[in-house]
Image (cartoon, rainbow, N blue to C red):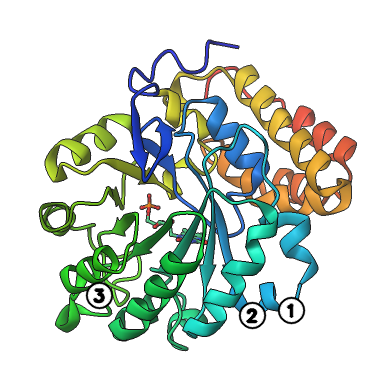
């Protein structure tokens, strides 16, 4: 396999959040259901930033000691450093309590989710719903910064809707209350994923606050990542959806350059690490969505898809993959 990071000339750039040193300015954005330890490790091997962020974790589940938190969400490898655990909730007291409970799993940072647009999260005032209650955000950051031994960061959208784009107010609050960095997805909650991310708003935030700003939204290549960084003068950027089924993106490699054998070998590495992490039964099911993305450029028949996506064993999956007899070029 090719040398994975050589094509990403900027993978070695350093910057910092508080006194945490970070290598690389192109960060894998947290994505629930995708960016578990195996996928973060894979993206890391292609040169994504050494700053890793967990999938979001519900404060209520943390407080109740839900088993998936220990089995999955807070597990991270030694080389995932700094490692941020991300919390979401609408209740400041619960967020603070949950953050304290998470300290036992040794995060380097605690990150607060103020960007999730999913209705069942945001409509109860959590995720992007918190943007409607700036006072709660002030309470969360003040309490956490005062009491936690690690830096506290936030990830926001631009506001709830077009009539309430309060990102500058929120950014100032987070900085004034001691937040150590801010990631910004350049859309409102109402936009979901429609329209284009607003780079001007990210630039405005960068001009307004002194703490590091991480720009995010719609980036699909390293070249675009560089463009956003130059345009908004942000300290780093995050890439989310474009990395799914495409982890070599962080090395500046396009899927179309890969030989099918290389693609198949990466698929197997990813599946193997998921089997080690989750055990076979869960891994094979969880891997299906990754497989669909990895193979999106091939026109599989419905029979081929069914065979691949209904197999329940590791061996069965690999056999189904081989049986596809994919052409050597994507
Ligand atoms: C399936 C999915 C799950 C996500 N889960 C999270 C999450 O757990 N925490 C978070 O801060 N953002 C989450 N996001 C938002 C991404 O981090 C990112 O802000 C958004 O996708 C925009 O970036 P992109 O255009 O590069 O994908 C999620 C996005 C997707 C598509």
On the image, the x and y values in percent for residue 63 come to 69, 77
Q: Is residue 148 left or right of residue 7?
A: right
Horizontal side of residue 144 vs 85, given as left or right: left
Mark closer to the observer (3, 1): 1
Q: CA distance from mark 1 to mark 2?
A: 6 Å
Label ID, residue 64: 1
Q: Estimate the spatial distance between the alpha carbons at disc 3 and disc 2, rounded to whole Å.
A: 24 Å
Ranked by sequence position, the earlier of labels 3 and 1 is 1
Marks 3 and 1, how far apart at CA: 30 Å
**Residue 99, relative to residue 285: is it above or below?**
below
Can you see residue 235?
Answer: yes
Residue identified by numbered label 2? 60
- Find residue 251 and report its horizontal and vertical position in percent: 44, 23
Identify the residue at image location x=43%, y=49%. 240
Badge 1 residue CB within 8 Å of ligand 1: no
SS category of the residue bearing label 1: loop
* Quadrant for the N terminus in the image: top right
Q: Residue at x 19, y 52 (%)?
A: 210
Q: Residues within 10 Å of mark 3 (few under 14, many from 20)?
A: many
Verify CB contact (< 8 Å) between mark 1 and mark 2.
yes
**Label annotation for residue 257:** none
Secondary structure, mark 3, is loop
Q: Disc number at residue 159? A: 3
Ligand 1: give its quadrant. Answer: bottom left
């Amino acid at each position: 396999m090719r040398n994975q990071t050589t094509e990403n000339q900027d993978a070695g750039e350093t910057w910092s959040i508080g006194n945490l040193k970070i290598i690389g300015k192109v960060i894998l954005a947290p994505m629930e259901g995708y960016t578990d330890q195996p996928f973060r490790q894979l993206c890391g091997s292609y040169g994504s930033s050494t700053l890793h962020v967990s999938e979001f974790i519900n404060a209520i589940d943390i407080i109740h000691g839900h088993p998936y938190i220990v089995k999955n969400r807070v597990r991270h490898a030694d080389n995932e450093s700094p490692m941020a655990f991300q919390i979401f909730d609408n209740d400041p007291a619960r967020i603070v309590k949950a953050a304290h409970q998470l300290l036992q799993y040794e995060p380097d940072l605690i990150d607060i989710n103020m960007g999730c647009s999913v209705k069942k999260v945001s409509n109860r005032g959590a995720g992007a719903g918190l943007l409607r209650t700036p006072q709660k955000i002030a309470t969360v950051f003040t309490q956490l910064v005062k009491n936690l031994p690690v830096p506290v960061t936030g990830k926001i959208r631009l506001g709830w809707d077009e009539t309430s784009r309060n990102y500058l107010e929120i950014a100032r609050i987070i900085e004034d209350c001691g937040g150590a960095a801010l990631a910004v997805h350049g859309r409102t909650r109402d936009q979901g994923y429609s329209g284009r991310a607003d780079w001007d708003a990210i630039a405005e935030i960068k001009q307004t606050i002194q703490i590091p700003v991480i720009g995010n939204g719609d980036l699909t290549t390293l070249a675009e990542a560089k463009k956003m960084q130059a345009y908004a003068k942000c300290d780093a950027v995050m890439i989310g959806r474009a990395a799914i089924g495409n982890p070599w993106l962080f090395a500046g490699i396009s899927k179309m350059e890969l030989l099918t054998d290389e693609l198949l070998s990466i698929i197997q590495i990813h599946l193997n690490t998921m089997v080690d992490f989750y055990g076979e039964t869960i891994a094979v099911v969880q891997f299906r969505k990754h497989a669909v993305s990895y193979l999106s450029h091939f026109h599989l028949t419905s029979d081929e898809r069914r065979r691949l996506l209904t197999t329940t064993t590791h061996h069965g999956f690999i056999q189904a993959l081989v049986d596809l007899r994919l052409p050597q070029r994507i």
